[in-house]
Structures are given as C-alpha cells and as structure tokens.
Amino acid sequence: MNTHQPDHSAYFAFRDQLLGPLRTTVLTSQQLCEAGRLIYGHEAGLSLYGIPAADMAPKGITLLGRTVIECSVDDYTAPVADALAALQAASQPQGPDAGNPLIADLFCGSGNFGHHLGQRLMRAVHAAELDPAVFGTARNNLDRIGSAITLRLTDYRDLLRELPARSTHDTYVVEPPWGPAFTAAGLDLTRTSPPVPEILDDIRRSRDGLPCHIAIKTNDQIAHDSLDRSFTGARHLATITPAPSLPSGANMDFHLYELHG
Ligand SMILES: C[S@@+](CC[C@H](N)C(=O)[O-])C[C@H]1O[C@@H](n2cnc3c(N)ncnc32)[C@H](O)[C@@H]1O
C-alpha cells in the first residue's frame, strides 16, 4: 500500500462526523490537526486568519465541526482576495460612494473569507451569521485576532437591507450551506439553502440597479449547469482553482462575477 496516498474513505467518514454528531461541538486541537490532514493532505492546510490548526487552541481559536468542513481556508481565500484586488485596481468604480466600496460576507461561518478580503482590499467588512453557535465561535475568533469585521447574528437579508449600494466595487461573499445540494451528481447551486439564484435576486433588489462583484465557492463538479444558470446575465470575471487534495467532486473552486441590476 502506498502510505503517501491520502485516505479518502477516512475523509468522508470524518466529514459525516463533522456535519453530524460534531456539528455544533468545539473541536479539540487533535481533531483540528486531523481535519487538516484529511481534508487538505497536511495538518497546516486547515489554517484560518493566518493561524494553522496546531496553533489554534493555544491562541484561543474555537471552531465547530460544521465550520471546519464549511470554511474557506487561508490558502483558498488569499488568492481569491488577490484576484479581486487586481480586477478592481483595473477598473474605475462608479456609484454614490464609489471610492468607499463595502464588503458583505453574507454567510459568515468562520468569517475567514471576509477577513482576507477586508485585509487585502483594506476595507471595512460587514458579516451575517444566522446560527447562534457558529456566531459565538466566530465572534470569539474575530475578537482574538483583533478583527474589525462588523458581525451580526442575523439573516443575510437583514444585512442586505442595512447596506445600501455604494459602489460598483461593492463585493458580496455568497457561501450558503450546501446540505442536499451536494450529491454524487455534483453541486446543484439551485438547491443550496437558500438557493443561490434567490440570494442573487436579494442582492440585486438591495442595489437599486448598481452592478457589484460576487465571490462564490463551489466544488469542482457542478450539477445541471447550475453555476451558469444561477449567474445568467452576470459577467464571469475569474475562476480560482486551488490544488486538489481530494477526489473529483470534493475539491473547491472559487468564482468571481460582476452582477448587474
Ligand atoms: C458554508 S458556511 C460559510 C463558510 C464561511 N464562508 C467560512 O469561510 O467559514 C455557511 C454559513 O451560513 C450560515 N447561514 C445559513 N443560513 C443563513 C442565513 N439565512 N443568513 C446568514 N447566515 C446563514 C450557516 O450557519 C453557516 O455558518
């Protein structure tokens, strides 16, 4: 047996644990390191806010099982933030407060995506998280790292209502839970909760016709053409594909779009 091959069956069993019995349990340091090895092929692959798994507990970082599987880690979000920064540097923003664009992390989870975008683009970040348990750990972690993210325990639609459009460089992170949208056939973005097309409609409605940027995570196997169908009428700007560590269908891709009103 080749001992260098990652044990994918162990990954899928661990994933079931994280989304099942360990869903709202704060993981131990050992479990965080195990998650790094099983999901990313090495312990430090699980790294959030610039803090690798082994350093999380000593630094007071707490993560629930569900967030460990749902989060977008540093190695993924930092390149997405770089790509977005390059795209925005190449275009002149328009809008009522064009030079002061907002970042809204609508499904915050760990808050790591908003954290990287805010740092890279040097902007204030607003975030919404609906699950009180996830909110509690995110609040703790963002305080520990001295983050200025404005985090609310609320539905993303409430956050949208509070954030009028400022600039064509306003950016929304759209990472709803996948749940039944993720099957052997791939990820169906019309079946996430809430469905991605519904979230995009909510964003459009909040913006009075002003275009904006969207960052979204998918896996590497989209079902029913649902990414293109969800973003009909939007302009694809970039896709960032991290090095795969899992079988096809279980790895992540990130996409940037310009959404029109
Ligand atoms: C896939 S996770 C987001 C992961 C996050 N981007 C990260 O890097 O950690 C989705 C999160 O959205 C939260 N959520 C689900 N429905 C929501 C809603 N209607 N409004 C705000 N947050 C919601 C869930 O509790 C969960 O923590």
Image (tube, rainbow, N blue to C red):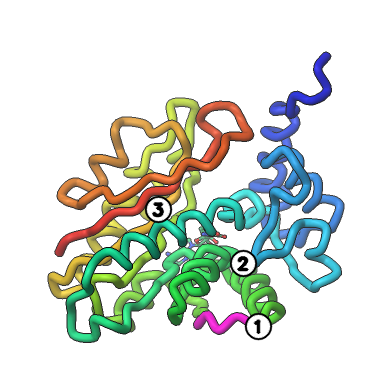
Is the CB–ligand 1 distance for label 2 below 8 Å? yes
Determine which residue is flagged by label 1. 146
The kind of residue on which mark 3 rests is Ile
Label 3 with label 2: CB-CB less than 8 Å: no
Prevalent SS, magenta region: loop
> How far is the residue under mark 1 from the one under mark 2?
18 Å
Looking at the rendered structure, the secondary structure element under dot 1 is loop
Q: Quadrant of residue 212?
A: bottom left
Q: 237 or 158: which is nearer to us?
A: 237
The kind of residue on which mark 2 rests is Val
Image quarter hosting the C terminus = bottom left
Q: Is residue 2 left or right of residue 104?
A: right
Counting from the top left corner in percent of width and height, residue 170 is at: 30, 72
Task: Indicate whether residue 16 is drawn in magenta.
Answer: no
Q: 29 or 161: which is nearer to us?
A: 29
Q: Residue at x 61, y 67 (%)?
A: 134
Determine which residue is flagged by label 3. 216
Give the number of the disc on residue 244.
none
**Marked residue nearer the N-terminal end (3 or 2):** 2
